[in-house]
Amino acid sequence: MSYKGTVKNGVVVLEPGANLPEGTRVRVEPDAGVTAQDADLDPAFKIGELAVDCGIPDLSVNLDHYLYGHPRVTDAR
């Protein structure tokens, strides 16, 4: 099992719910993809992490078609 945390004043502070028994040995590795500034940003900033490939090549052009059944756009500009 792994837990996430942040270094504050030289001490690793784990995320809420990470209850480890006193004296538990741990290994700490920096997460190269996240900086302290990123962690303080609005959660919407990380919305791209939720994106998945749905296999629909024209989704951005025909979103209304797929969501609401509108006619497909054939000449997108």
Image (cartoon, rainbow, N blue to C red):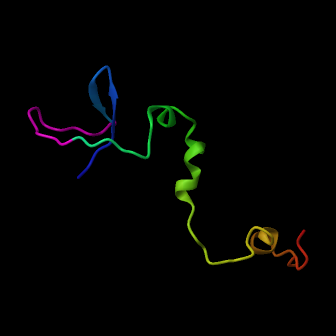
State the image quarter where residue 21 is shown.
Answer: top left
Q: Residue at x 11, y 38 (%)?
A: 24
State the image quarter where residue 75 is shown.
Answer: bottom right
Magenta: main secondary structure equals loop
Horizontally, residue 15 falls left or right of residue 55, namely left
- Residue at the front extreme, as displayed: 32
Q: Residue at x 28, y 44 (%)?
A: 3
Horizontally, residue 40 falls left or right of residue 11, namely right
Q: Residue at x 54, y 58 (%)?
A: 50
- Residue at the left extreme, as displayed: 23
- Residue at the top extreme, as displayed: 9
State the image quarter where residue 71 is shown.
Answer: bottom right
Residue 5, placed above or below residue 54 = above
User: In the rendered structure, which segment of residues is drawn in magenta?
Assistant: 15-27
> Would you say residue 4 sits in the magenta stretch?
no
Residue 32, placed above or below residue 77 = above
Q: How many marks?
A: 0
> Would you say residue 20 sits in the magenta stretch?
yes
Q: Picture coordinates of residue 63 (x, y %)?
A: 77, 69
Q: Picture coordinates of residue 25 (x, y %)?
A: 11, 39
Q: Picture coordinates of residue 5 (x, y %)?
A: 33, 37
Q: Residue at x 81, y 74 (%)?
A: 65
Where's the C terminus, which quadrant? bottom right
Q: Picture coordinates of residue 70 (x, y %)?
A: 86, 74
